[in-house]
């Protein structure tokens, strides 16, 4: 899942971005409205995390939200701000924001809100996926194989989640590389490494190699 993180305070943006990446999200960072537009167009995010006070003005985030909705963006918007006046919250939600988090907040809470918003907007309405020996609790990020819980790293989970959310789709190795490991130097090899790891930790049939790429293998 792709997150656009708009925040001008480096000291907050960097740790948030690091945490989200660690959890397997693809994160684009923007420190101003200007950067945010470019990043939005390039990243096609599934969620926008939006600071309100930006270099372009104390209401810049609100303006951006309005413009995003006008441009047809329908994904969740999470406002993040130091301002906590009730008016602001109401305004943020009126402008099409989905949630509102006031600084300071802890990283865990932020992560929980992001997860909740993405779940709400995800094409799979229920948060539990079961097929054959595989069961995935998408909300709790837990994975079971033949009834036994298996620990996955953030990246491993992100790969499995992508396949589970699109159970009949074939992904090319290039697509997986782009979506899960953007900017990596190691090329397609890293995709094969992670597929190997999923097959090793779960079962060899969890990911099927098919003409054109890979798809969820369990039936
Ligand atoms: Ca700010």
Image (cartoon, rainbow, N blue to C red):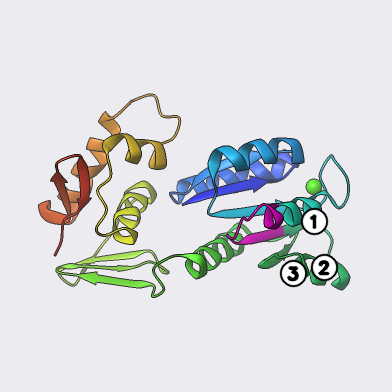
Quadrant in the picture for residue 90: bottom right
Q: Residue furthest front?
A: 71
- Whether label 1 touches label 3, CB < 8 Å: no
Vertically, is 96 above or below 157?
below
Q: Classify 10 Å Cα crowding around label 3: few (below 14), some (14-19), many (20 and above).
A: some
User: Where residue 48 sits: x, y (%)?
Assistant: 62, 53
Q: Magenta includes 114? A: no
- Which stretch is magenta? 68-79
Query: Can you tell me whether the CB of the residue at mark 2 lies under 8 Å from the nearest atom of ligand 1?
Result: no
| Residue 159 place in picture, x, y as percent | 32, 49
Give the SS element for disc 2: helix
Q: Which residue is mark 2?
A: 91
Please report whichever mark, 1 or 3, sits nearer to the chain's N-terminal start: 1
How many angstroms separate mark 2 from mark 3 (CA)? 5 Å
User: Within 8 Å of ligand 1, the CB of disc 3?
Assistant: no
Residue depicted at 62% across the width and 38% down the height: 39
Asked if labels 2 and 1 touch by Cβ distance under 8 angstroms, the answer is: yes
Q: Is residue 72 magenta?
A: yes
The mark nearer the N terminus, 1 or 2, is 1
Q: Nearer the viewer, residue 186 or 173?
A: 173
Disc 2: CA contacts within 10 A as few (<14), some (14-19) or many (>=20): few
Task: Determine whether 99 is above or below 26 in the image.
Answer: below
Q: Residue at x 48, y 67 (%)?
A: 119
Marks 2,3: beta carbons within 8 A:
yes
Would you name the residue on which mark 1 appears? 62
- Quadrant containing the C terminus in the rendered view: bottom left
Return the residue at label 3.
Answer: 93
């Amino acid at each position: 899942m792709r997150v656009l993180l708009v925040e001008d305070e480096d000291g907050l943006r960097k740790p948030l971005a690091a945490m989200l990446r660690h959890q397997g999200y693809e994160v684009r960072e923007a420190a101003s409205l200007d950067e945010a537009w470019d990043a939005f167009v390039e990243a096609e995010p599934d969620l926008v995390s939006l600071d309100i006070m930006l270099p372009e003005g104390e209401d810049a985030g609100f303006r951006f939200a309005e413009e995003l909705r006008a441009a047809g963006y329908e994904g969740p918007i999470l406002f993040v701000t130091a301002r906590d006046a009730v008016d602001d919250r109401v305004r943020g939600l009126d402008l099409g924001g989905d949630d509102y988090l006031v600084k300071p907040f802890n990283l865990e809470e932020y992560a929980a809100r992001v997860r909740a918003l993405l779940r709400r907007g995800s094409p799979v309405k229920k948060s539990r996926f079961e097929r054959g020996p595989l069961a995935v609790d998408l909300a709790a990020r837990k994975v079971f194989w033949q009834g036994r819980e298996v620990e996955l790293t953030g990246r491993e989970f992100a790969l499995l989640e992508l396949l589970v959310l699109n159970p009949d789709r074939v992904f090319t190795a290039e697509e997986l590389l782009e979506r899960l490991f953007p900017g990596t130097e190691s090329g397609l090899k890293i995709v094969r490494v992670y597929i190997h790891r999923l097959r090793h930790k779960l079962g060899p049939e969890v990911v099927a190699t098919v003409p054109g790429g890979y798809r969820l293998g369990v039936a």
